[in-house]
């Protein structure tokens, strides 16, 4: 391996290590990546899970080249303090969150939480990959004058660019939804060319009950996933 490539890989690992440390203590590998969804989670229904989408002919979606794989998974954050708080399905690039929720009362009227899931990817020589479609499942149950926000970010370690999804809630609001978003061609965020890299997605929640401190409010991120990828030679 060339020294330049080795240096870039080391820089990438240091960048994600620093970021993870600032978010939360880095946890070990998930004990069970294939655990079934817990009762009540139902992160994506069959009709909107991407199963049908994955069978369609779409120029944004292609089979990964030989040699692509996920080497390991790490999680951390106040919204997932234990590895059992997240189920990661590596084949579907999906994270199911079991405790990513904020409620009022109790506690302060303004609160936030997050969970960062990092995937160590092996990218075959001569290839780059970019997330082309992302999906998130959220729910909120808010009294009047209570607001909330769910944000998902997807990025490669060491790259300042990211793909971001945001969902705003304003009470009264009582609903749940799944939202898929296709990334425009000129906004695709590409991995380094033919190098191991770390791809991460961060889910965060904010709840603001300052205008109704005694009101009831709950906001939750149930799951997020990459439903389509785009590959190119480099």
Image (cartoon, rainbow, N blue to C red):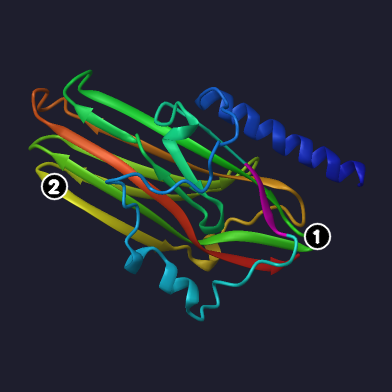
Q: Secondary structure at mark 1?
A: loop
Residue at (43% x, 69% y) in the render: 51
Residue 10: image quadrant is top right
User: As drawn, is 233 to the left or to the right of 5?
Assistant: left
Residue at (30% x, 45% y) in the render: 39
Front one among 153 and 46:
46
Q: Is residue 191 above or below residue 19?
A: below
The residue furthest top is: 107
Image spot of residue 209 (x, y percent): 17, 28
Residue 135: image quadrant is bottom left
Residue at (48% x, 71% y) in the render: 54
The residue furthest right is: 2
Q: Which mark is residue 125?
A: 1
Q: Which residues are magenta?
A: 68-72
Image spot of residue 49 (x, y percent): 38, 63
User: As drawn, is 141 to the left or to the right of 82?
Assistant: left
Residue at (84% x, 45% y) in the render: 5
**Residue count near mark 2 (Cα–Cα under 10 Å), binned few <14, some 14–19, many ≥20:** some
Q: Secondary structure at mark 2?
A: strand
Identify the image quadrant of the C terminus. bottom right
The residue furthest bottom is: 57
Image spot of residue 161 (x, y percent): 56, 47
Front one among 41 and 64:
41
Instruction: Give the residue at mark 2.
Output: 174
Front one among 29 and 78:
29
């Amino acid at each position: 391996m060339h020294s330049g490539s080795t240096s870039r890989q080391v820089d990438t690992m240091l960048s994600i290590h620093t970021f993870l440390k600032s978010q939360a203590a880095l946890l070990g590998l998930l004990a069970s990546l294939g655990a079934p969804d817990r009762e009540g989670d139902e992160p994506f229904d069959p009709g909107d899970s991407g199963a049908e989408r994955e069978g369609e002919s779409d120029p944004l979606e292609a089979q990964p080249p030989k040699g692509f794989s996920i080497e390991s998974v790490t999680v951390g954050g106040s919204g997932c303090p234990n590895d059992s708080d997240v189920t990661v399905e590596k084949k579907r690039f999906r994270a199911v969150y079991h405790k990513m929720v904020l409620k009022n009362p109790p506690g302060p009227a303004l609160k936030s939480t997050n969970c960062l899931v990092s995937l160590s990817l092996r990218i075959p020589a001569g290839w780059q990959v970019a997330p082309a479609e992302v999906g998130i499942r959220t729910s909120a149950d808010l009294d009047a004058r209570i607001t909330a926000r769910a944000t998902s970010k997807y990025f490669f370690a060491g790259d300042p660019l990211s793909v971001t999804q945001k969902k705003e809630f304003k009470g009264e609001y009582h609903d749940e939804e799944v939202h898929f978003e296709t990334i425009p061609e000129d906004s695709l965020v590409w991995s380094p060319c033919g190098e191991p890299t770390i791809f991460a997605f961060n889910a965060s929640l904010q709840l603001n009950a300052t205008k109704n401190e005694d009101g009831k409010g709950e906001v939750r991120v149930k799951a997020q996933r990459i439903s389509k990828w785009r590959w190119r030679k480099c």
